[in-house]
Image: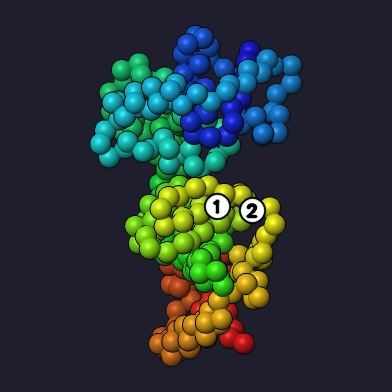
Amino acid sequence: MKIYTYDHTFEGLLTAVFECYRRKDFPIDICSRYAKPRYLFVESVDIQTDPQKAERVWKGIQDKLSAGNKQLLFYAYLSEEEGIEMRIYRFLRRLFSGYMNLETDFGDSDVIYIVQSAQKVKKEAMRILQFVRFQRTKDGMFFCGIEPKFDVLPLVVKHYQNRFADQEWLIYDLQRNYGVFYDKNKVEEVEITKKQFNAINGQVKQALLDEDEDFYLKLWRSYFKHINIEERKNLRLQLQHMPRRFWRYLPEKHEST
């Protein structure tokens, strides 16, 4: 019995799938090399990421899946659900064996799990687009710290790159400790070791904020307060559309000072 380990990237997982086929192996698990060990006395095979091998597997997936599901497995992978790698691997074995209309075979537990995981990830990405609030720093950069349920930063980057193409910005995942920085030309992944922001709510230290930031913050709170009709408040409906876990990032949900 073997387990395959990889570098906790989607490319790494696809490389592991390639190696399973090349070596004619069917491991009992595929997991990140950084995850806590789940097996004793099992041979571990560590797979080094190879972009060319990953690309061959990805091209095979694109050729097999229907137009609306080209990104299905990537979305499911971003859910970070325990065991998602093996579900994706078993899905791919059936897909590459020639099984037709596999993504709608909801009698298969792996298929329905992958589809549901992908849907949850896409929903979370939409919420991040709705509830992101940037702060402007003294050096002119816009910063936002978030803590999504799933690893959705790769899904929202294009939106902000298009919308704020003429501005520098950084969106940082507080839970996974990495972010995406845009310098008006390109996007790159970054990790901040010396944090100048609150690791809980992502708020930048006051001394680093642009001098007009506090004014616009108070202006926004005042606007929100005046358009809010107290007699028509419906907390249940509000929570349905704006989950409480996002409130700490929203200035309109904080008391003004």
On the image, numbered disc 1 is attached to which residue? 179
From the viewer's perspective, is 33 left or right of 149? right
Residue 91 located left or right of residue 218: left
Pick out the residue farthest to the left: 67
- Check disc 1: other Cα within 10 Å, few if <14, some if 14-19, many if 20+: many
Image coordinates for residue 222, horizontal then vertical, percent: 48, 88
Residue 3 horizontal/vertical position (percent): 62, 20
Residue at point 56%, 81% (across, down): 211
Between 207 and 34, the residue placed more toward the observer is 207
**Element carrying mark 1:** strand
Q: Identify the residue position indicated by label 2 in the image.
A: 192
Residue 221, compared with residue 85, is above or below; it is below
Give x and y (percent) for residue 15.
49, 23
In front: 230, or 253?
A: 253
Q: Position of residue 237 (x, y in %)?
A: 43, 72
Mark 2 and 1 residues: CB-CB less than 8 Å, in contact?
yes
Let me know if residue 224 appears in the view: yes
